[in-house]
Image (spheres, coloured by chain):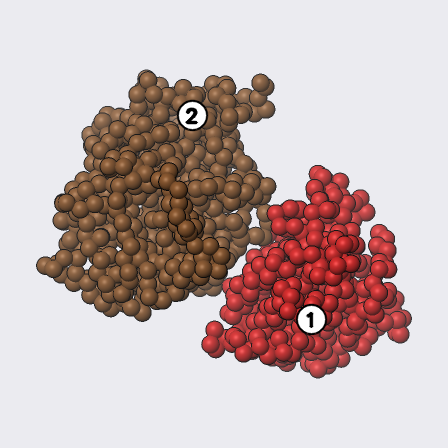
Chain colours: A red, B brown
């Protein structure tokens, strides 16, 4: 399978995401660093996916809408599973700070290619970005494996998770399972706290559940063992669905995968209708400063960023020992949906961009001031 | 026109279920899981179990001018459904009935239902309170209505089973404590209670612990706001099922969706995410032993001279806009009617079956609902969350039932939407569009002034819904008239309906209680019961005007009892006159208490499945014929 071509329309220098050193985590502190990086990695994809979803004109492109929506929710599930894993090994998941939210466009991490992940409207370029993000990594041996040269650097997200997996195994061998998994079980988010997507949140309390978490994250993204499908049927007794990569490919190819299809065969099921023009095109490098002071668009973009900070603040509270407050994320997400609808339907305030048909868009520039305001506005104790 | 459906003539099933609504879907599920071959015949269409079908219904709902319960669902002339818009109040009182029903009673039967795969439970509110133990013997204890041949204890395990299959969220400890419902020790619902609305909390702060009297000489009743159990996805309770927990069932037609209520506030007529239970969710879990044939209107149940039924005759159509159809038959060992109380009665009457007692079609009941509405002195955040999350349960039973019907009070979360069509009704009024006066309208509000006035008003709207128990009366009935038929030639239900004085006294008491509650709340009462086009349920009692609404809870038409002489079905919902014909659903209920009846209907259906399964086992157990000598030796009864 060939990876899609690199888009070249991004003018600015992409932001670089911090990556842990190219090795298997050596000790607990190392593992914490890796898992915090995994948390950021899982989050990195959410703004681009939300942008694709919110740029679909309301009421159109329903198959694409539900596919992207389901993937977004599963990325949130992955974030939560990583947070559980980090809590289980005595770490503290941190998501409500401005360093956590990378600027966009960002360089795709854990990859040799200088590939920009940008906030693109729904379309071929966005889908090609998503395919690049979720690309199955069949050769993903962890650092130190005989087939992997020592100085190679990360080649894929799958390899990064393989390193975490290897680190978990070796740390359990070295210090014992009970010694590694010392986190307070009360900090674990459970199935009662989060669902509404494929898969299920489960508490991580030892090696078995930790490895299962890693497997769910990689299988839902890339598919299980060279198949098109994820493992939700095996792990959760749910309907088996194409993994993220293949769901995006279905939209791009405008055809769904049939039950016997393989990655090599491509999708051969029923046609899937996509309205490529039922979209609000946006400037993939939009910033709030591009919108005039005092304009309604600027205000809406600011409110969206403030709302997004609130979402991350709720998540940090939930991951920080108050799993039940995860439910507060639901109204915040609904509010973000409404704010997005109000923002994206406006032409870009810049006349030249508006003439190119571009619309205003959310920028995901979340600042410390936004987080301070979010903390001020809501806390789980006052909740 | 060629038919794509398989020719079923001559095919033989173990069970035919007539109707793919709540009761029929549960019966098919249980029996299919037991391995029986089940044919489900559904009169309506089957478009809603796919996501595009669901979205089509959403679109129809958004576009509908009147958001009545049937608004999202496409019309069907082959299998017409009654609609709330069929009824029209007359200027000086009285009503006119258009549409599918023929009505000739003093008062109108003011409820609808939906003939489509999934049935009326596609647009139910999803409230699942259990009946009160005293509801099962109202005749013995309070001297009105009819008694059940079984009691709460007989039904209790089936209530639990129903709460599992519907996925109920609730607080069992609170139900036990506030209402006195018995539960087994340690029982919890599959999911935690749906959180109370802000309005519930505001009302609880002002009402809890306050005694009220419905009249000056009546004993005091202490108010308490109690959360209502819902068949609606909430937070799973990890304690459920001995710690095994519960996995909420998501939407039909879209994987991994709708696994939690997010407060879209349109449960009636359609839950956009399907967090609310609907029978399509059960249908999605049917075994391959269950065949559903939609667009198949059962026109007759077929019986032998010996009283046993052997199948049904049905009319298969392709186009719901045309009366063109093909008449077919299907055969089975057992036939289960699950087509709605009124449709079941209609089928029995047209088939001339099960009517030794003369009770088929009689005892038609609903919950007449009295609405009261007012403005509170502070914003209460209406139009969020399910239509009702809490109620006042303290008038559901007690000695007062001897004199007047009991009632259950639902706290409405959607402002004045039911009584006055808010919020669009408020907008129209403030714009100066006041209906059909035909006169030039004066200056309305608009712009910022309109928005501010709307905010001030809508945000403070409160409404109480008093669901009053209606007693079984043989004069309230469904009949058929050969001259009055639908487009397929099937008889239309002819309905004769009225409220007894017992019910009217209950309604008057409900209004008196409302007045006192509004007084305690300091609410500005805007309740108005003038006759008019939107008040077909208007009546005068004791010199005062009242208006009731239908609750959609049609019941009683094939009433259950302990004798063939006085009832249509036995406690298994099996027709006394035909040992292999069942009629399931609310039609079997001898009384409806004050509970929304779907949970009880589901419990009854699950209970009947046990007997149907036993019946089928008996039919299939080989008769062992042995030489006489061997039998004697085996049983030790040998004699010469």
Chain on which label 1 sits: A
The residue lying at 11 percent from left, 60 percent from top is B216
User: Can residue A24 be seen by looking at this rendering?
Assistant: no
How far across and down, in percent of the image, does residue B473 sit?
Answer: 20, 36
Using the image, determine if residue B452 lies above or below residue B478. below
Q: How many marks?
A: 2
Tell which tag, 2 or 1, sits nearer the viewer: 1
B494 sits left or right of B22 in the view:
left
Give SS at disc 1: loop
Q: In the figure, residue A368 lies in which quadrant?
A: bottom right
Q: Residues within 10 Å of mark 2 (few under 14, many from 20)?
A: many
**Which residue matches tag 2?**
B298
**Which residue matches tag 1?**
A365
Using the image, determine if residue A312 lies above or below residue B569. below
The residue lying at 43 percent from left, 54 percent from top is B445
How far across and down, in percent of the image, does residue A346 sit?
Answer: 66, 57
- Mark 2–mark 1 Cα distance, whole angstroms, equals 62 Å
How far across and down, in percent of the image, does residue B299 sit?
Answer: 40, 23
Q: Compare residues A27 and A33 and report the one nearer the observer.
A: A33
| Quarter of the C terminus of chain B within the rendering | top left
Chain on which label 2 sits: B
């Amino acid at each position: 399978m060939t990876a899609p071509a690199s888009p070249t329309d991004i003018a600015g220098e992409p932001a670089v995401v911090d990556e842990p050193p190219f090795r298997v985590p050596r000790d607990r502190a190392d593992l914490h660093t890796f898992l915090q990086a995994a948390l950021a990695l899982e989050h990195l994809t959410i703004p681009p996916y939300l942008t694709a979803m919110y740029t679909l004109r309301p009421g159109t492109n329903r198959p694409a809408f539900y596919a992207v929506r389901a993937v977004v929710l599963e990325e949130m599930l992955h974030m939560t599973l990583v947070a559980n894993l980090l809590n289980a090994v005595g770490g503290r998941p941190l998501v409500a700070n401005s360093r956590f939210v990378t600027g966009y466009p960002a360089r795709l991490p854990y990859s040799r290619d200088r590939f920009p992940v940008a906030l693109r409207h729904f379309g071929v370029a966005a889908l090609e970005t998503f395919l690049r993000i979720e690309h199955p990594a069949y050769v993903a041996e962890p650092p130190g494996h005989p087939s992997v040269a020592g100085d190679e650097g990360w080649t894929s997200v799958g390899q990064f998770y393989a390193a975490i997996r290897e680190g978990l195994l070796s740390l359990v061998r070295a210090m014992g399972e009970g010694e590694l998994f010392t986190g307070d079980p009360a900090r674990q988010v459970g199935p009662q706290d989060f669902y509404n997507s494929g898969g299920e949140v489960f508490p991580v309390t030892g090696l078995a559940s930790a490895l299962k978490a890693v497997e769910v994250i990689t299988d839902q993204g890339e598919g299980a063992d060279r198949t098109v499908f994820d493992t939700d049927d095996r792990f959760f007794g749910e309907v088996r669905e194409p993994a993220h990569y293949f769901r995006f490919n279905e939209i791009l190819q405008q055809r769904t995968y049939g039950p016997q299809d393989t990655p090599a065969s491509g999708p051969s099921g029923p046609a899937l209708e996509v309205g490529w023009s039922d979209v609000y095109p946006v400037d993939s490098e939009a910033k709030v400063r591009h919108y005039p002071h005092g304009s309604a668009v600027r205000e809406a973009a600011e409110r969206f960023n403030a709302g997004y900070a609130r979402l991350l603040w709720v998540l940090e509270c939930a991951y920080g020992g108050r799993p039940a407050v995860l439910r507060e994320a639901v109204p915040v997400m609904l509010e973000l949906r409404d704010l997005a609808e109000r923002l994206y339907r406006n032409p870009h305030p810049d006349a030249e961009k508006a003439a190119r048909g571009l619309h205003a868009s959310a920028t995901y520039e979340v600042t410390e001031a936004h987080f301070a305001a979010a903390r001020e506005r809501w806390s789980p104790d006052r909740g | 026109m060629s038919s794509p459906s398989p020719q079923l003539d001559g095919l033989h099933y173990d069970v035919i279920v007539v109707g793919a609504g709540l009761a029929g879907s549960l019966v098919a599920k249980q029996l299919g899981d037991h391995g029986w071959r089940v044919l489900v015949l559904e009169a309506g269409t089957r478009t809603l179990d796919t996501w595009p079908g669901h979205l089509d219904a959403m679109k129809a709902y958004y576009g509908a001018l009147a958001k009545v319960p049937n608004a999202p669902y496409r019309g069907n002339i082959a299998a017409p459904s009654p609609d709330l818009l069929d009824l029209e109040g007359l200027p000086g009182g009285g009503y006119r009935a258009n549409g599918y029903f023929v009505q000739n009673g003093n008062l109108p039967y003011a409820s609808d239902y939906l003939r489509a795969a999934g049935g009326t439970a596609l647009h139910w509110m999803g409230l699942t309170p259990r009946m009160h133990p005293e509801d099962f013997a109202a005749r013995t204890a309070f001297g009105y209505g009819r008694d059940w041949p079984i009691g709460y204890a007989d039904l209790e395990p089936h209530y639990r089973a129903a709460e599992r299959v519907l996925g109920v969220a609730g607080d069992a400890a609170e139900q036990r404590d506030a209402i006195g419902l018995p539960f087994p020790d340690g029982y919890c619902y599959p999911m935690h209670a749906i959180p109370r609305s802000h309005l519930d909390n505001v009302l609880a702060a002002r009402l809890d612990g306050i005694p009220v009297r419905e009249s000056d000489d009546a004993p005091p009743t202490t108010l308490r706001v109690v959360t209502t159990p819902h068949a609606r996805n909430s937070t799973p309770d990890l304690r459920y099922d001995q710690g095994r927990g519960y996995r909420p069932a998501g939407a039909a037609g879209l994987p991994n969706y709708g696994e939690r209520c997010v407060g879209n506030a349109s449960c009636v007529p359609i839950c956009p995410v399907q967090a609310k239970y609907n029978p399509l969710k059960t249908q999605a879990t049917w075994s391959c032993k269950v065949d559903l044939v939609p667009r198949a209107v059962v026109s007759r149940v077929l019986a032998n001279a010996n009283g046993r039924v052997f199948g049904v005759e049905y009319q298969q159509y392709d186009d719901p806009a045309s009366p063109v159809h093909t008449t077919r038959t299907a055969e089975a060992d057992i036939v289960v009617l699950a087509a709605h109380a009124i449709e079941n009665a209609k089928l029995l009457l047209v088939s001339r079956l099960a009517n030794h007692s003369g009770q088929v079609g009689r005892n038609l009941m609903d919950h007449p609902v009295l609405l009261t509405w007012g403005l509170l002195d502070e914003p209460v955040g209406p139009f969020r969350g399910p239509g009702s999350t809490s109620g006042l349960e303290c008038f559901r039973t007690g000695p007062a039932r001897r004199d007047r019907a009991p009632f259950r009070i639902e706290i409405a979360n959607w402002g004045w939407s039911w009584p006055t069509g808010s919020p669009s009704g408020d907008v129209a009024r403030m714009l100066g569009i006041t209906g059909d006066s035909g006169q030039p309208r004066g200056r309305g509000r608009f712009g910022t002034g309109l928005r501010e006035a709307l905010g001030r008003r809508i945000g403070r709207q409160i409404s109480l819904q008093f669901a009053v128990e209606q007693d079984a009366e043989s004069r309230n009935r469904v009949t058929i008239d050969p001259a009055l038929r639908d487009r397929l030639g099937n008889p239309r239900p002819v309905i004769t309906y009225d409220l007894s004085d017992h019910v009217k006294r209950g309604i008057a008491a409900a209004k008196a209680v409302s007045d006192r509650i509004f007084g305690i709340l300091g609410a500005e009462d805007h309740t108005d019961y003038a006759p008019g086009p939107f008040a077909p349920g208007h009546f005068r009692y004791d010199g005062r005007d009242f208006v009731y609404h239908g609750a959609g809870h049609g019941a009683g038409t094939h009433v259950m009892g302990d004798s063939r002489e006085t009832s249509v079905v036995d406690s298994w919902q099996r027709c006394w006159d035909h040992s292999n014909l069942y009629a399931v659903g609310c039609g079997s209920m001898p009384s409806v208490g004050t509970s929304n009846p779907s949970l009880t209907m589901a419990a009854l259906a699950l209970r009947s499945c046990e007997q149907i399964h036993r019946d089928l086992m008996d039919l299939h157990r080989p008769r062992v014929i042995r030489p006489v000598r061997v039998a004697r030796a085996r049983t030790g009864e040998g004699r010469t």
